[in-house]
Image: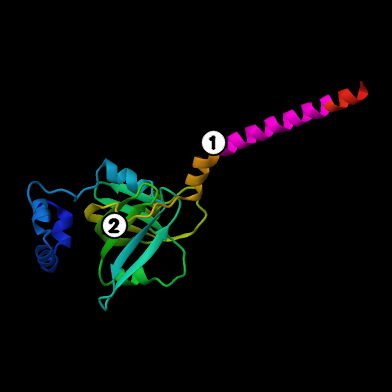
């Protein structure tokens, strides 16, 4: 199949629903041509590198999906090459659900969202753990200056990706984004306050001079 994401996600059951709902013809076009969406390009790499969080789903031994939020400073997700991403696994609540599920099934699904720009990227891949004693590899996943302790690392071999429709993504903004957007306004307010203070001083000096006269 041309589109690797469709190859994995569009199972016979999914195709049957698409057929019943009238969208199958549109998605069937994705199955033609050369294989795409199996290797990260410049756009995907830049998008991933700019994220400070994502959601990752894995599969338990009992078949239940498990979704977990992962976060860190911007850039904590590393694009190692066109087919591999990785990140340091910072110490959390020590439930180890994702780590335990990985022992049974290495398949994972990720969603990365840019709420401000209303964009999201879906990734399908196979994961493996980077042990603490793998110092050189773990160092590639480190984020200099971040104080959280990394217990291990994750490497994910990309099987497929897909850019999702921005519809229904509510715009949200980080503190840093808001600070950058409001900085010119704050500077203008400070400038006006300085000017007001200067005029008050001038008015006070003028009033004092008139009383002396």
Left or right: 26 as drawn, with respect to 45:
left
Q: Which residue in the structure is indicated by mark 1? A: 184
Left or right: 121 as drawn, with respect to 36:
right
Above or below for 209 versus 42? above
Where disc 2 sits, the SS reads strand
Residue 193 part of the magenta-drawn span: yes
Q: Quadrant of the N terminus?
A: bottom left
Q: Return the residue nearer the eye: 141 or 46.
A: 46
Q: Give the alpha-carbon distance from disc 1 to disc 2, as whole Å.
A: 41 Å
- Residue 152 figure quarter: bottom left
Q: Which segment is the magenta one? A: 184-206
Residue 132 visible to an observer of this rendering: no
Above or below for 36 versus 14? above
| Furthest residue toward right | 212
| Residue 198: image location, x then y, percent | 73, 29
Residue 37 visible to an observer of this rendering: yes
Where disc 1 sits, the SS reads helix
- What number is the disc on residue 54? none
Q: Quadrant of the C terminus?
A: top right
Mark 1 or mark 2, which is nearer to you? 1
Left or right: 95 as drawn, with respect to 40:
right
Q: Which residue in the structure is indicated by mark 2? A: 156
Q: How many residues crowd around disc 2 within 10 Å: few (fewer than 14), some, or many (20 or more)? A: many
């Amino acid at each position: 199949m041309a589109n690797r994401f469709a190859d994995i996600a569009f199972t016979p059951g999914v195709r049957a629903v698409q057929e019943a709902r009238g969208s199958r013809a549109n998605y069937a076009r994705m199955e033609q041509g050369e294989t795409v969406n199996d290797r990260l390009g410049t756009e995907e790499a830049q998008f991933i590198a700019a994220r400070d969080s994502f959601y990752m789903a894995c599969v338990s031994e009992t078949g239940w999906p498990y979704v977990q939020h992962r976060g860190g400073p911007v850039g904590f997700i590393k694009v190692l090459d066109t087919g591999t991403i990785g990140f340091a696994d910072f110490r959390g609540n020590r439930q180890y659900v994702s780590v335990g599920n990985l022992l049974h099934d290495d398949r994972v699904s990720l969603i990365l969202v840019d709420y401000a720009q209303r964009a999201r990227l879906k990734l399908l891949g196979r994961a493996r753990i980077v042990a603490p004693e793998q110092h050189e590899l773990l160092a590639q996943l480190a984020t200099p200056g971040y104080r959280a302790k990394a217990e291990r690392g994750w490497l994910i071999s990309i099987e497929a990706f897909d850019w999702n429709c921005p519809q229904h993504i509510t715009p949200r903004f980080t503190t840093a984004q808001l600070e950058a957007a409001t900085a010119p306004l704050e500077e203008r307010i400070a400038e006006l306050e300085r000017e007001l203070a200067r005029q008050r001083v001038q008015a006070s000096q003028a009033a004092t001079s008139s009383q002396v006269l």
